[in-house]
Amino acid sequence: MKTKMIILSALLATSSAFAATTTHSSDAAVAEAHKGADTAKEKLHQSQNEGKELKLKAEHAREGKTGTTGSKISEGSQKAWNNTKEGTEKAWDKTKQGSEELKNKVTN
């Protein structure tokens, strides 16, 4: 009987340690997945923004406005707007991930 209790205690102790290790590993995997998703999303948005900027430049060229003050201002504004959107999205993503991590810490 005493041997069974020792074995049972050992099993419970190792299962708790295993669960803690598994939780840490899954947290790391989730963090890595978020990082990869953020990178992919960032690259996608950069490509989309470059497309918008090129489209605007092509439109100015078609209208014969290339190099004018108005076209430079318009193109600069487009670029600034794209940078603002990217920065806001990055901040929002970090906020969501931070709240998700906090939620996981509280529930675990």
Image: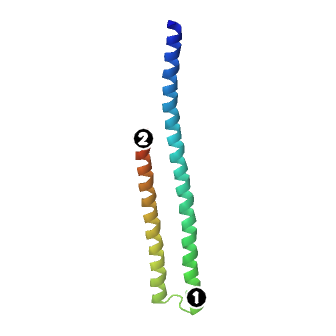
Residue beneath the point at 57% across and 71% down? 48
Which of the marked residues, 2 or 1, is nearer the chain's N terminus?
Answer: 1
Q: Where, quadrant-wise, is the C terminus in this rendering?
A: top left
Q: Residue at x 50, y 47 (%)?
A: 31
Dividing the picture into quarters, in which one does residue 44 lie? bottom right
Which of 70/26 is in front? Answer: 26
Task: Please name the residue that numbered disc 2 is placed on.
Answer: 107
Residue flagged by tag 1: what amino acid is it? Ala
Q: Residue at x 50, y 42 (%)?
A: 27
Q: Nearer the viewer, mark 2 or mark 1?
A: 2
Q: Position of residue 55 (x, y in %)?
A: 58, 80
Residue located 46% across and 69% down the image: 85
Q: Position of residue 60 (x, y in %)?
A: 55, 88
The circle drawn on residue 61 is 1
Of residues 59 and 100, the one nearer the viewer is: 100
- Compared to residue 90, the image places residue 105 above or below, namely above
Residue type indicated by callout 2: Thr
